[in-house]
Amino acid sequence: MAAIDRLHRLQMMMMIGMMMMMVMMMMKMMMMMVMMMMIGMMMMMTMMMMMIGMMMMI
């Protein structure tokens, strides 16, 4: 019985580990998305500024 119990515990640990890995991956993906969004927003802002600048020039 002890061996079975140990195996079960190992399985549980593995499951928890997998869950943690999944969460970490999700977090990383979210961070990447946020970073991309931020960069995109900055690019848009710079473009807008440039457009406004051109308008002012003309």
Image (tube, grey):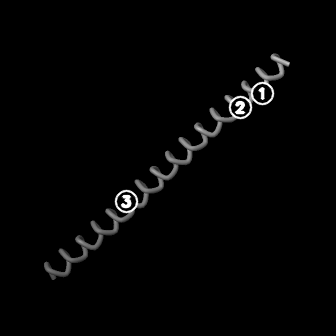
Of the residues under marks 2 and 3, which one precedes in the sequence? 3
Amino acid at circle 1 = Met
Q: Could you tell me if the residues under marks 1 and 2 are in contact, i.e. CB atoms within 8 Å?
A: yes
Residue at the disc numbered 3 = 21
Q: Quadrant of residue 39?
A: top right
Name the residue at the right extreme: 58
**Marks 2/3: CA–CA distance:** 39 Å
Quarter placement of the N terminus: bottom left
Task: Quickly name the residue at label 1.
Answer: 51
Whole-percent x, y for residue 9 in the image: 24, 71
Q: For this view, does 9 lie left or right of residue 56?
A: left
Residue found at x 76% / y 20%? 53
| Residue 4, position as x, y percentages in the image | 19, 81
Q: Tell me the crowding category of disc 3: few under 14, some 14 to 19, or many 20 or more residues within 10 angstroms, Cα based.
A: few
How many C-alpha atoms fall within 10 Å of the one at disc 2: few (<14), some, or many (≥20)?
Answer: few
Residue placed farthest to the top in the image? 56
**Cα gap from disc 1 to disc 3, whole angstroms:** 45 Å
- Which quadrant, please, contains the C terminus? top right
Disc assigned to residue 19: none
Q: Residues within 10 Å of mark 1 (few under 14, many from 20)?
A: few
The residue to which callout 2 is attached is 47
Q: Amino acid at mark 3?
A: Met
Q: Quadrant of residue 52?
A: top right
User: Secondary structure under badge 1?
Assistant: helix
